[in-house]
Image: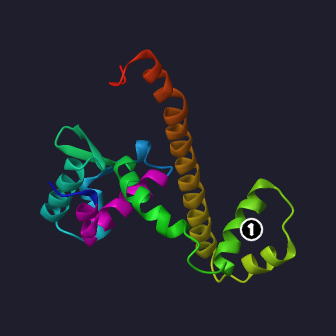
Amino acid sequence: MADIFDVIADPTRRDLLTALRDSTASADRPGGEISVGQLVEKLGLTQPTVSKHLRVLRDHGLVSVREEGQHRYYSLDPAPLEQCEDWLVPFLGADLRKESPEDAAGSTVFTAWSGTQLPEPLRRAAESLPTASDAGAAVGRVAAAASFQAKTALQDASQGVERRVIDPLRKRLGRKDGG
């Protein structure tokens, strides 16, 4: 069975995921559902092509389907993409380069959103970005890095408790099997 990276490697499936994500964000679609016909129209693909790729996405848990008569309505389930996120975040959050204006913009946007007064250099950096999507991408990277750091800290703390507390208790009680 293909892993999640093989599934999203196909550009048609990525386009379908994007269309499903956009329909989820749309207020006029209940539950973010979109029909196969609407996907065909939106992407300019044939119905068999869309159905074939939706089947692959469904088989890997990236979409769910609701049948109503002869119509099928699809919605996005992003949970399997967490595997990709877990792999990518260390690369995106790694300090492999000096802080750029984009990185500063991520902090700027978050600071502005939180209502905190912005330091002048960060405000200037945010204003220098050509589009709002640059700020959004920067915010996404900053949020992903923070999420990864928090998840790693929790895992490390859990392993520390296991090593320093649980294991000695098991040993003291004469249990090695963890039960």
The front one of 30 and 150 is 150
The location of residue 137, given as percent across then percent down, is 56, 70
Residue 140 quadrant: bottom right
Q: Is residue 69 left or right of residue 179?
A: left
10 Å crowding of disc 1: few (<14), some (14-19), many (20+): many
Q: Is residue 100 magenta?
A: no
The residue identified by callout 1 is 108
Above or below, 139 relative to 115: below
Near-viewer residue (5 or 177): 177
Q: Find residue 61 and report its horizontal and vertical position in percent.
A: 27, 46
Residue 167: percent from the left, percent from the top?
46, 29
Q: Is residue 14 left or right of residue 158?
A: left
What type of secondary structure mainly makes up the magenta span?
Answer: helix
Q: How is the image coloured?
A: rainbow
Which residue is at a point 43% across and 43% down the rendered structure image? 30
Image position of 52 with respect to 179: above or below: below
- Foreground pick, 1 / 159: 159
Q: What is the quadrant of the N terminus in the image?
A: bottom left
Q: Residue at x 23, y 38 (%)?
A: 68
**Residue shown at 23% from the left, 45% from the top:** 72
At label 1, the amino acid type is: Thr
Instruction: Label 1, secondary structure: give it.
Output: helix
Quadrant containing the C terminus is top left
| 165 left or right of 118 in image | left
Residue drawn at x 76%, y 61% as measured from the top left? 111
- Which stretch did the figure color magenta? 5-25
**Residue 69 falls in which quadrant of the image?**
top left
Viewer-closest of 98 and 134: 98
